[in-house]
Amino acid sequence: MADRIVALSGNPTARKFASQLGVSLPPVLKRDSEAWAEQPLAGKSVLVLGTTGAELTAPLATALARSGAEPVVDGDLAGFAEAGEAWGRPPKAAGDEEKVDVIVFDATGIRDIAGLKALHGAMQPRLKGLQKSGRVLVLSRPHKDVAGIEASATQRALDGFTRSLAKEVGRKGSTANLLVVKEGAEDRLEPVLRWFASPRSAFISGQPVVVSKTVRRAEDKARRPLDGKVVVVTGSARGIGAATAATMAREGAKVVVLDHPSADAQAAEVAAKIGGKPLLLDVTEPDAGEQIVAFAQEHFGGLDVVVHNAGVTRDKTLARMKEEHWDFVLGVNLAAILKMNEAIVPALGKNGRLVFLSSIGGIGGNVGQTNYAASKAGVIGIVDTMSARLARKGIAVNAVAPGFIETRMTAAIPVATREVARRLSNVSQGGLPQDVAETITFLASPGAHGLCGQVVRVCGGNLLGA
């Protein structure tokens, strides 16, 4: 069911009338559902800020220049000059009233309280120049990796700073996220930065993401990153799964549209639209994993990416929950995944990817969802354990945790509960299946080789979860 209040937000007359009444409408989010471009930040003005000792100037300068951005530097231009000249985009000095699409703050050099004061001094006067639906990216180091108690405390402080800032800028449809770059992983920053700086991350805010070199390096493709990759998306006949199948096909993937036999017509329709192959299969069948591998190899010659999206709910408070409802949810959402992976993992090709669908319900819990929350928290446990084991084989394992997304499932929620859930995000609205699909597609791409063992919340910075 569409959000009528968000629909009103897109009407200039309605916004003017609401303003006269003193009523605040949700912001209109700028999204991008077109195929990835060679230079996704072309024409975007990116303001670069930093403090003394900033450590990511060189990779940041290269990333912005290669992505087509127009860098605006508040400080020394020297570190951005060489990369800018090489790509024909020399940096310019920031003016006092600079209007920008993205603000990037390199906070990797902050090691004391004085550094945090410098962060405030540099950022505070610049926020008024951030355009609607803008992006703020704060770059830091893992706080446990820096020497000294004060240094660790101040790097960790950037997490709380970014989460709070995300709630403030969300009123204008903007987002703020923290990119934590491990030492030695600087060359993995570029694809992560360009994706989080783009409109594709419209419903991700207040999120810390760790960039590491855990998984071996893969060829980074800014355009059609999944060309030739064979992808299986479970539960892809409708909703988030269908959006994911279509988005991955858009980026060049050969997609197996897998869903329950009862979704025969819908799976066939999705597959026909994207040039994929439908596979009707109950994921709880004992040999489901073997069937998936055999089907992918028969029709496409291999298997590169599996998206574990299939899931169910059977909501009741624990005191009223029947045993069969508990067993059903845990069986589909958790046990089936574990069993399927026994066959899937050995079959994955070089630089394979596993993407799991968790939920902010599995992080923060929900009344009446002890079974569902347990299963989705269990998925995070799978990611935590498998990511370390499979990284040695070049396989990146990550999860996506959606918040309130406008799907058939959330449309069945009682009206009052649904409205409250929508307004709990920083941007005062629910997300779209496309928001989740874009995130999954990025995590499945070769350029996401800097992310492994991550749980990316696609929730708009929802108050539920952390």
Image: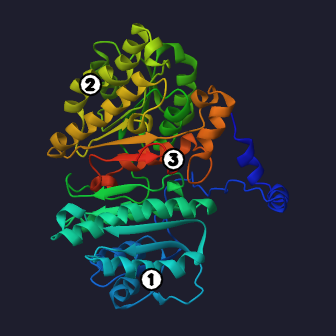
Task: Inspect the image, locate mark 2, and give the three-letter code of the amino acid beneath it.
Answer: Leu
Q: How many marks?
A: 3
Name the residue beneath numbered marker 1: 121
Which residue: 80% across, 55% down?
A: 11
Name the residue beneath numbered marker 3: 462
Q: Secondary structure at mark 1?
A: helix
Determine the CA span between mark 2 and mark 1: 50 Å
**Residue 313 in sight in this render:** yes
Residue 8 in the image: state x and y as whole percent.
Answer: 77, 50
Which residue: 83% across, 61% down?
A: 16
Q: Secondary structure at mark 2?
A: helix
Q: Is residue 415 above or below residue 3?
A: above
Name the residue beneath numbered marker 2: 338
Which residue: 18% across, 46% down?
A: 391
Determine the CA span between mark 3 and mark 1: 28 Å
Decide if residue 247 is on the left or right side of residue 133.
left
Residue 88 in the image: state x and y as whole percent.
Answer: 44, 84
Determine the CA span between mark 2 and mark 3: 29 Å
Decide if residue 177 is on the left or right side of residue 426.
left
